[in-house]
Amino acid sequence: MRISSSTLYDVNVAALNQQQGKMLHTQQQVSSGRRMLTAADDPAAAAHALELTQSDATIAQYAKNIDASQHLLSTSEGVLQTVTTLLQDIKTVSISATSPAMANTDRQIIASDLRGRLDELISLANSTDGLGNYLFSGFQGKTQPFATTAAGVQYMGDDGQRLSQVSANRQLSGSDSGADIFMRIKNGNGTFVTQAAVTNTGNGIASQGNVINPALLTGHNYQVTFAVAGGATTYTIADTTNPANPVNAQPPTPYVSGQAISFDGMQFDIQNTPANGDQFTVVPSTSESVFKTISDMINALSTPIAPGSAADNAQLTINLNHAQNSLDRGLDNILTIRASMGSRLNELDAMKSSGADLSLQLKQALSLLQDVDYNKAITDLTQQQTGLQAAQKSFLQVMNLSIFNYMP
Amino acid sequence: MGTDIFGVSVSALNTAQIGIATTEHNIANANTAGYNRQLVVQAARPAQLTGAGYVGQGSDVASIKRVYDQFLSAQVVQEQATSTQLNTYYDQIQQINNMLADPNAGLSPALQDFFGAVSSVSSAPESTPARQTLLSNAQVLASRFQTMNQRLIDLNNSVNNQLTNSVTTINGYAKQIAALNQDVVTATAQAGGKPPNDLLDQRDQLVLQLNQEVKANVVKQDDGSLNISIGNGQLLVVGAQAFSLQTVQSLNDPTKLEVAYGVTAGNIIRMQQSGIQGGNLGGLLNFRSQSLDAAQNSLGLIAMGFAGTFNQQHQLGQDLNGVLGGNFFVQPVPVVNNSTSNTGAAVVGASVSSYSALTGSDYSLQFNGGTSYTLTRLSDNTVTNIPGGLPQTVDGLTISVAGAPVVNDSFMIRPTVNGALSIAVAITDPAKVAAAAPIRTNATLTNNGTGKISAGTVNAPPPVTPDPLHPLTDQNLQQPVTITFTSATTFDVTGTGVGLPAIGVAYTSGGNISYNGWTAQITGVPSTGDTFTVGPNTTASSDNRNALLLGGLQTQSTLLGGTTSYQGVYGQMVTQVGNKTREMQVTSTAQETMLQQTIQAQQAVSGVNLDEEAANLLRYQRAYQAAGKAMEIASTMFDTLLSLGR
């Protein structure tokens, strides 16, 4: 085959260009550390890398959200821990007030002590997150959730829960509404409440009772009326909501102090000696705020007892029993919420570490996709360098060959 | 007889001289582009009949021909046109590819930072700094869209400039070829039919250069001139006459120049652009229609879909002032260009009715008379016939018309082309970020049952009775509504709104309760008399419900028929550009190799080999020396004859 002289140059120049281009590409890979210099180097991997980068960025964002939620939850949990101690103190104090040795003045001292503790409780319930947002006001972070009014402590917030996106498909509540913590507490034993009528003259004390058969509960109001005739004390039970209740038709039952009185799934007892006409009501539990429970307790303690009045004493005992029961339920409620907060904090911890693991995996995957393999790149570079040197040397040698060299 | 001997020697000397001159010409032009080596065609003179028979009379140069293979040369020209087209396309698309390559300058980081800021607002909805950061990041994102779009616009302008330059070059070549046609015809006639080799080489070289600009069809005429046509047969050169091309504004898009055929000044014939293939022109036009427009539309689709879906969700929320959210981003709108050749006065409008149905393609709408229109989706040439007149919704686009069109009037609808250009942040006040939901639900504190009400959500648009000021939400959305249980299994709903009051609604735990454009669920066992309220969400500075929904849009499949996220569309765009760049890289390299091989084959025939020429030099030198020697011998013979008479 004929070879044109200029072809020799052209081919060699093209080959040198090509080799230099390849070397530049490898050199850029080494100096930038990136395998894909542009999307054209590996289009599918480039798009995949974009997805992975986004996933990694969202995980980093979830980690920030987790931090924020953890801060909110642990602050709330800290406040509720103090509240728990406070409520336990209040309960201890109120138990000491039931001692028969107490005088009116002693009770009033206790009542004023409790007033101070009630204020402390209100201020705890109005705690903020350190940035001026109230912890327990639902969506209304700038609204003080608990305000003292003539009608007692009122909740000004709402039922909102501040959710936080902590993983791709999990939103976790970082707050609990003040209503759920402090307001929605069923009084009495949680199902029904026993109360003595204020007109009672005997010293009968009704226990808080308990549910023995939930299936029979009616949710009705009842009245237990005592009759003393000829030294025999009897009581009758009346369903005031539904007069047709068969319990209304029962004959008077002889009364024995401390003996269980049970009907319609409920059971309680009455102790001591009720007088003729004394009444006790049994009504379904209603929501009562822990503030009202403590206020009621303070009211009961600050109401003076007429010396020697058995009825007043009984009323005090019943009121304190009722308040203590409600307080127990309030404590239970707060402990339940704290437990839920604790489990949420645990979940956040778990999510944080699983997020970190996932982020590491994503970074590894990303590195595999876009980072250069230095061993390979440097080997390639050396190989290309050798190739280029060979091409240069051989080009010069070939170009030196010419007949003109030998012509005279 | 003796004179004959001299005659033979002189013919040999002449022949050798011409041989040496031609060889030197070859050596001199060894590096001349387009040069074909020339060869002396030597022929023996007719012999003289003598008694002894025919005696040779020496040699003549019959012709100097160029060593030229028509087929190989035509192949080089064709390969060159394709190769330049691919190279030009590759050079252009590389610029988009490089723009997308930088991981820190692309759209992804700005999109991620933006949604990071949305997430921060959801963590601290009352925080003005967090909201301000969101607005700043929104600005960054909007300007990232604009910057990337500006690069594409710059590329479009650069394509326009290159088209104009290329057309000027083509016109220059056409004139030179026409002039050379004339010269070739004249020179051939003057030489009595002998080829003017160097003129032919020059003309062939010009044809090759012309093919670097555009693929040209060459037809050789009997008189030796070349007729050249381009595109779909438009004649560029006929004999000694050259026609010119020019660039004119596109009928449908004022930002684009097109190549047109200029017969005379002021009288132009528009050419079908897709018919122009090969060379720089073909590369530029293909790049613009296949990659540049697609990239701009894709970027616009992301910007438009992103702004649209984000705005929609933002309008379902409530800002820090307790006001329903407005547009967060300035919403880009579709562009409609009336063809400049339209004779009717109709103005066609297009608006987006569904962001998820948008395709990112351009559309051409043609009026057929009556109420009939034809809509063509240009990405795949899908034709939609609209017999019943406008408005009509196709691919998430509602097309309407005002005024009367005339038959064959056409309109170019480019839904997403300006998406990335016109996106901007619509709000400047951080308080106007609608992070909260406009309603909240409450269970009354004195409820005795265990019923709980969910936080409630605003229904997706469109609402049944839209608010005139906020068309995406119901006019009664924030009206206080009370749900009162009249028994364990029924409830009444009271308040203002469509279908209210509702009495004796059956209760199912967890069932949807939906009025006034909101939906909530009640679970558990409510007691008779329990009440739940749904109402305005006043002073809700810590409510982040809408911010969470806005943040969720980052990964939601909202675009391209609900198949992919914003990032997904961007990823597709990167892959498309990357794939096309790779394709162009591979095919242009392959084509380059092809071209080189063809050139080598052509050069193997026509190229100058200096060693060969050196040998030829020696050959003709020896021939010359030998002829000289022969003359010396003839002279000696003559002297011998003269000395005989002394």
Image (tube, rainbow, N blue to C red):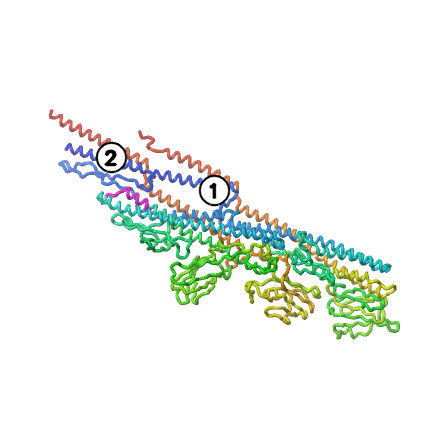
Q: Which residue is drawn at 26% across and 36% down?
A: B19
Task: Residue B276 in the image: state x and y as whole percent.
Answer: 37, 52
Element under disc 1? helix
Highlighted magenta segment, given as a residue range: B194-207
Mark 1: which amino acid? Answer: His
Task: Residue B220 in the image: state x and y as whole percent.
Answer: 28, 49
Task: Please give left or right for residue B294 compared with residue B439 in the image.
Answer: left
Looking at this view, is B108 or A288 the one in front?
A288
Task: Please give left or right for residue B329 compared with residue B407 in the image.
Answer: right
Looking at this view, is A199 or B195 the one in front?
A199
Give yes or no for residue A63 being in the magenta stretch.
Answer: no
Give yes or no for residue B198 being in the magenta stretch.
Answer: yes
Structural distance between the alpha carbons of marks 1 and 2: 54 Å
Task: Residue B125 in the image: state x and y as whole percent.
Answer: 62, 55
Mark 2: which amino acid? Answer: Gln
Hey, which quadrant is residue B187 in on the image? top left
**Residue under numbered circle 2:** B17
Looking at this view, is B61 or A228 the one in front?
A228
Give a yes or no on whether discs 1 and 2 share a subunit: no
Hey, which quadrant is residue A227 in on the image? bottom right
Which chain contains the residue that carries disc 1? A
- Is any part of residue B13 visible from this angle? yes
**Residue under numbered circle 1:** A25
Q: In the displayed orientation, state which residue is furthest to the top.
A: B646
- Above or below B485: residue A133: above
Element under disc 2? helix
* Number of residues whose C-alpha sits closer than 10 Å to that of mark 2, classed few (under 14), some (14–19) or many (20 or more): some
- Which label sits on residue B50? none
Task: Residue B182 in the image: state x and y as whole percent.
Answer: 26, 46
